[in-house]
Image (cartoon, grey):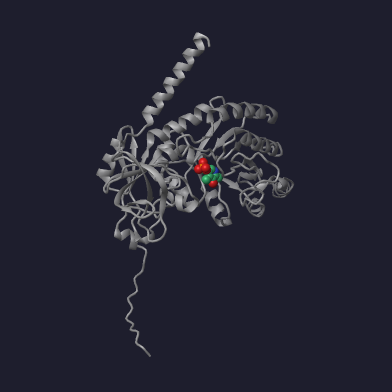
Amino acid sequence: MSAKTSLICLVKYRCYFWRLYRTYMKNETLINIAKDYKTPVYVYNGNKIKNQFQRLKNAFNKVDNLRIKYACKALSNISILSLIRSFGSGLDTVSIQEVHLGIKAGFNPEDIIFTPNGVSLEEIESVASMGVQINIDNLSTLEQFGSKHPNTPVCIRINPHVMAGGNSNISVGHIDSKFGISIHQIPHILRIVENTQMQINGVHMHTGSDILDIEVFLHAAEILFDTALRFKNLEFIDFGSGFKVPYKPGDIETNIEELGEKLSQRFKLFCKTYGKELKLTFEPGKFLVSEAGYFLTKVNAVKQTTSTVFAQVDSGFNHLIRPMMYGSHHEIVNISNTKGKERFYTVVGYICETDTFGSNRKIAEISEGDILAFRNAGAYCFTMASNYNSRFRPPEVLWYKEEAHLIRKEETFEDLTQNQILIEFNETVVVN
Ligand SMILES: *Cc1c(COP(=O)(O)O)cnc(C)c1O
């Protein structure tokens, strides 16, 4: 290694550790937030969100027209939206309500894309009338929308039939997905476009699964490039998301830097072939916010049974449903006793049915009253919370530049009942 390359390596490493240091949330800070705002509480580290945004931007720094559109279904608190907007992001939305939230948070309609699946034509028309980019993913909607609004530019969501998640078996994999219009139906799309004279200004894909293998992503990209050549007036190509983030030590994550290097090069080449500088769009959700989130709970009881030791916390799947819904792994850390001897616990919630956050986890010795932090609680956690068991949804706190901001209050009994209508009955039931 030459002196110059070792110097570059050293600088890169120092930057890496400096970034890690800057974006790391201290246990002490989390404990203080738990004290100040009570548990359960969601905490988001805005510094980490910013860092992830920066990483994605850096990875594609060779592309002139990069557009990042945060997929807000992952975490849709309006202050989070406002923060991510301030970084220069656009927004990816899947419902008209998300579009309204985005506009409330300060996004321009032109920076929002609407990528619904299976919604009514009326909803699509309402969103289009607000000046938001529409993305259509089925033939009949395309035909109806195109006939009625030929002058509204539309993006088309393609299903490239690629199995993400390490399986590079392309052609027919994923054929049963309900998302996107099959690449095998492109002749049909072209017929609709010609008949309605509608304008197609973008092509889009989003495989939806965790992408482990960059080659699979690049292969899907080739399919999208082929598709793009069939449309003459494109302005952008949208590669969706599906970037994998680590959930536990040793987990593989999408190598965004490598993907950036390879895809940027290929994209520039494509633009030459196409004869126009297009915009390159991504819609990261998880990648931006997953690792930024912590869900803090307090241990109500430690219960020894014949088979395991249960740690019962003051929350349940009403607040964090991912482990029960699709077996997601969230690391659980006892931040009240980080140096304690590790023991095995099954961490459960208070919901009156099976409500397991994690089985047989090695956690530093737990006492009643300790605060347990769930990691990766930024994406698809609060947004999936409910009032099941008539519990309040927890407050949300944003930690940004060494300061805590309350961004959602805990609910109250009034919130629970405000839309319910009480009818007073006066019946009696007698034996007859
Ligand atoms: C959910 C979604 C995303 C974000 O996916 P992540 O895996 O959270 O990054 C992006 N685009 C569309 C259309 C989506 O529905």
Extreme-top residue of the structure:
3
For image coordinates 43% across by 33% down, the residue present is: 87
- Left or right relative to 277: residue 106: left
Among the 4 quarters of the image, the one containing residue 350: bottom left
Q: Is residue 424 above or below residue 156?
A: below
Left or right for 199, reference 58: right
Residue 365, given in percent of the width and then of the height, sits at 31, 42
Towards the viewer: 133 or 349:
349
Tell me the quarter of the picture where residue 183 sits.
top right
In which quadrant of the rendered image does the C terminus lie?
Answer: bottom left
Residue 172 coordinates in the image, percent (x, y)? 70, 46
> Residue at the spot x=37%, y=27% of the render?
21
Count of numbered circles in the view = 0
User: Where's residue 112, x and y in %?
Assistant: 51, 42
Q: Quadrant of residue 412?
A: bottom left
Residue 112 visible in this rendered orientation of the protein: no
Residue, far front:
306
Say if residue 300 shows up in the picture.
yes
Q: Is residue 296 left or right of residue 98?
A: left
Residue 150 in picture, x, y percent from top left: 65, 48
Q: Residue at x 72, y 46 (%)?
A: 184
Depth check, front residue: 123 or 241? 241
Residue at 40 percent of width and 34 percent of height: 48
